Image (tube, rainbow, N blue to C red):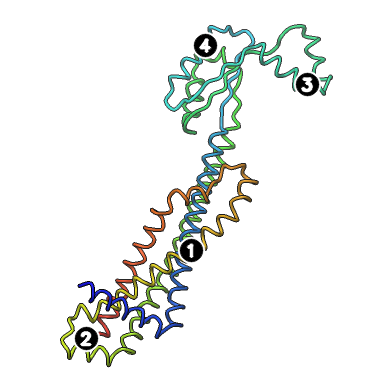
Amino acid sequence: MLYATLRVIKFSWKNIWRNFWLSVITMSTIIITLFTISLVLALEVGLKQIIQTAEKHIDLSVYFYPSVTEAQANSVITVIKAIPGIQETVYITKEQSLASYEKRAQDSPELLAPLKVIGQNPFGAAVTVRANEPAAYQRVIDELNKPQYKDLIEGQKKEFEENRQFIDAFTAFTDKVRVSGLVISAFFAMIAALLIFNAIRVAIYTHREEIAIMKLVGATNWFVRAPFLTETIIYSAIAVLISGGLFFILMYFLQPYLDGYFGGDVAIYSYFSHNALMIFGAELLATVILNIIAGSFALRRYLRV
């Protein structure tokens, strides 16, 4: 069995070298297909990481009237904490609000003049709310818009809504990128399958006399077909190795620029390093299956055994 397997592999390599340029073109197309798929996946991972980073910076600030006591503010905070999806609430006292304003106004004396005229702290307490999911902020707003909070809540700082619009638009863009990438990858995969089909056809034509002799001396159908299918597996393995190597080289040199621009929030190289076996293993499996299917069609059509 081992001897037969070695013979099959040897015969496959002979096919590849005998039709060298056709083999190069076939593998190049498979490499382009796999490289395109890897780029689409990298782009999707990067965009998702950007969205996750943006979501981490979303918050909602709730401002109380100056007349609201700390006990009243704490009762509202307790209600907010009970809302599903709330991660953290940070209470800011009246004194802290005043100190923060004075610090910001140090270089603008005209902003401090109204405070001297008023003669007392005009600021109320506030609470900053952070949630695990953007939808939780809307639940907070819906709760605070109830009539019982009308005399307690002065206003809400809603920058998160603009961020939410940005995230929604970015997510839609990510979906379009994914679909476009899959269409392009499918196009190259179809070309690769046709080239595999043609490569097997040429190999069968080149070895037609050898195949006839093999059948005359009693070679089984499996032994005749196996080298051609093994040839497709060799194409797939080499293509995955080359495309994976090129992709990691690209990501290695690109990652420092991503770190400089996004501050380390987009770690594509790290993601692929930790998931290389799963990602490129799946690419190899999918490529082998596709190439075997294409090769099998060619064998059925042109190899009458």
Disc 3 vs disc 2: Cβ atoms closer than 8 Å? no
Give me the residue at 48% from left, 25% from top.
87
Q: In the rendered view, does 53 fall on the left or right side of 110?
A: left
CA neighbours of label 1 inside 10 A, class few (<14), some (14 to 19), many (20+): many
What's under tag 3, amino acid-wise? Ala
Q: Earlier in the sequence, mark 2 or mark 4?
A: 4
Give me the residue at 47% from left, 66% from top.
242
Instruction: Say what secondary structure mark 4 lies in.
Output: helix
Q: In the rendered view, does 149 fall on the left or right side of 263?
A: left
Q: Can you identify the residue that label 2 sits on?
A: 304
**Could you tell me residue 234's position as x and y percent?**
36, 72
Give me the residue at 22% from left, 79% from top.
223
Q: Can you identify the residue that label 3 sits on?
A: 105
Q: Can you identify the residue that label 1 sits on?
A: 35
Q: Earlier in the sequence, mark 3 or mark 2?
A: 3
Disc 1 vs disc 3: Cβ atoms closer than 8 Å? no
What's under tag 4, amino acid-wise? Asn
Instruction: Say what secondary structure mark 1 lies in.
Output: helix
Query: Gap in Å between the C-alphas at discs 1 and 2?
Result: 36 Å
CA neighbours of label 3 inside 10 A, class few (<14), some (14 to 19), many (20+): few
Indicate whether 96 appears above or below 241. Answer: above
